[in-house]
Amino acid sequence: MLFSRSICNTGIRQFPDLTQIFSMEAHFILELCDNLRMTIIPQNAFQGMNNESLTLKLYKNGFEDIHSHAFNGTKLNELILKDNKNLRRIHNDALRGATGPDVLDISSTALESLPSYGLEAIQVLNATSSYSLKRLPPLDKFSSLLEAVLTYPSHCCAFRNLRTERQNLLFSIFDNFSKECESTMRRPTNEMLDDSNSTLLWSAERKTHSFGTDYESSPYSYSTIFDDSEMAGFDFEYDFCQPKVLTCTPEPDAFNPCEDILGYSFLRVLIWFINILAIAGNFTVLLVLLTSHYKLTVPRFLMCNLSFADFCMGLYLLLIASVDAQTSGQYYNHAIDWQTGGGCSTAGFFTVFASELSVYTLTVITLERWHTITYAMQLDRKLRLRHAVPIMLGGWLFSIGIALLPLFGVSSYMKVSICLPMDIETGLSQAYILLILVLNVVAFVVICACYIKIYIAVQNPELVAANKDTKVAKRMAILIFTDFTCMAPISFFAISAAFKVPLITVTNSKILLVLFYPVNSCANPFLYAIFTKAFRRDFFLLMSKLGCCKSRAELYRMNYFSAYNSNCKNGGAATAPTKASQAFLLLSALEKPYPAPRDKTSHKENLPRVPSYPLQGQL
């Protein structure tokens, strides 16, 4: 009797005709290995070889494609296709006409998908080192699966809490009986086995029939209700309360839990509101500033850079929100494509570039305001556009360089679904994260120090009324609070994580991502531009060009010329202002933010022209 057949290490190019082989052996094994010139498995390749169980070990061959009905007419116990490095396709109907297999091994192949038909009988699936297999078929296809050894942890999320078809059938019939199982499982084992007063079916049966002998003949045995195929997988009656559970490896780790990109449902709604606010607000500011007919001043130039950086942050949030909406409920099937593809790398670049450029520009804006007020009397020390351009060019180069490093192996954007550089496995990656965090903290300290100095400079009891002083303080407090709200929580938890002492899970960190991380990007266009009168003037003038809001635009023009004439008349009697009064004059431009007159008045040498966006609404 023929027990097995082996065809290995040959140079044959065509798949051999195996239909002439027939064995009466109950567990016949066919082995084809190391046949590197075989490229396909044709239709009906194994038909008629055996009427019983068949094990096919087809490994380390040159197979590239398995055709439709390739396993037709077989009763497969095991189908081993491992180490076929060039195997990229199994036809959807390759297993049609076959029974089984119970075990499928596709390890170390180039398969990109599994067939949609014939997976129902699989109990063991081995797909280790199958890096091209990024998506799984619908889960209902794996109705009998008990063990899965896969390549990607995210795929195991698909099998979490998945019950096999047999278990679902048993639990549906014994729904009320399963409640007895729950109460029984809470009792000690010896009590469950020895309690003579127990009314449970298996306890009554155990008193009459021992486990090892003839338990199927019991009148209460489940075998009297189900046939042998339905009882497969249950070794004895008590196994009903402890059914076999599907096991899957590798299990998801802390960086990639079994959840969608955003995790929480309320974040999925909130992120749309935030990203639309950030994109619309910053786009409006950019549009108004770039189309304004006023001269491009240093504050305007800096505001354009800040708005662009915050606009990029809005694009990052929009990208994350869009992918989350598309993959909701099935992220496990898209996780690999997303995190290892260009989409996540693009999103990560956008967020790091935008965050660093925004922080850098905020710091430059604050320093520029402090410098303008401190040296208000010294026109030769005034910051001009030719100075601001190289300063911001340095900021752009720095931000781009920092954002590019994870693309070249310093940390990684692929570590988590939200595409932030959270990889700290190497010392260089850890130093990279700490560098970003420390620079952000230093920037916040510089901003706070400058605001305090500005506040001290504008305090002049002779010129500033108490309510004005309070108003300035409140505006400073708002700006510092928004910066603190954005930087403090993220910096605190990120620094602890960088030292490998995480105080928050990735799931909870997504709350920080949506609620705190983009605070500045949403608030900056309003605090630094939209809430200022200068911006509203430019906005209505722009709208008037489009045929809208003409009356409001005309009102702003009238106020501008009225203030211009008033300054001209009072200019001759003006005396040289003190440093404090000059600082307050700059601040008061928030209420009257028009360009100062350019006529030759007696105070021109002492009083510099007020820029169009003084302090950019900071105060």
Image: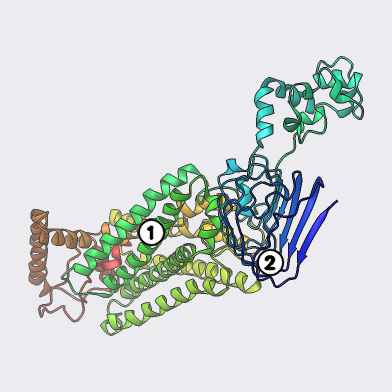
Q: In the rendered structure, are the residues bearing label 2 and label 1 in contact, judged by CB atoms less than 8 Å apart?
A: no
- Taking depth in this image into account, of 1 and 193 the one nearest to the observer is 1
Location of residue 78 with respect to 12 vertically, above or below = above
Could you say which quadrant of the image residue 60 lies in?
bottom right
Residue at 28%, 76% in the rendered image? 376
The tag earlier along the polypeptide, 2 or 1, is 2
Residue 291 position in % (x across, y down)? 19, 68
Q: Nearer the viewer, mark 2 or mark 1?
A: 2
Location of residue 508 with respect to 210 vertically, above or below = below
One can see residue 504 in this view:
no
Could you say which quadrant of the image residue 588 lies in?
bottom left
Residue 509 position in % (x across, y down)? 55, 53
Quarter of the rendering occupied by the C terminus: bottom left
Residue at 76%, 44% in the rendered image? 52
Mark 2 element type? loop
Mark 1 element type? helix
Residue 439 position in % (x across, y down)? 51, 71
Residue at 76%, 36% in the rendered image? 233
Label 1 belongs to which residue?
Answer: 314
- Taking depth in this image into account, of 546 and 438 the one nearest to the observer is 546
Residue 38: assigned label: none
Label 2, label 1: how many angstroms apart (C-alpha)?
51 Å
One can see residue 97 in this view:
yes
Residue 117 position in % (x across, y down)? 58, 46
Q: Residue type at mark 1: give it.
A: Gly
Label 2 belongs to which residue?
Answer: 61
State the colouring used for the structure image. rainbow
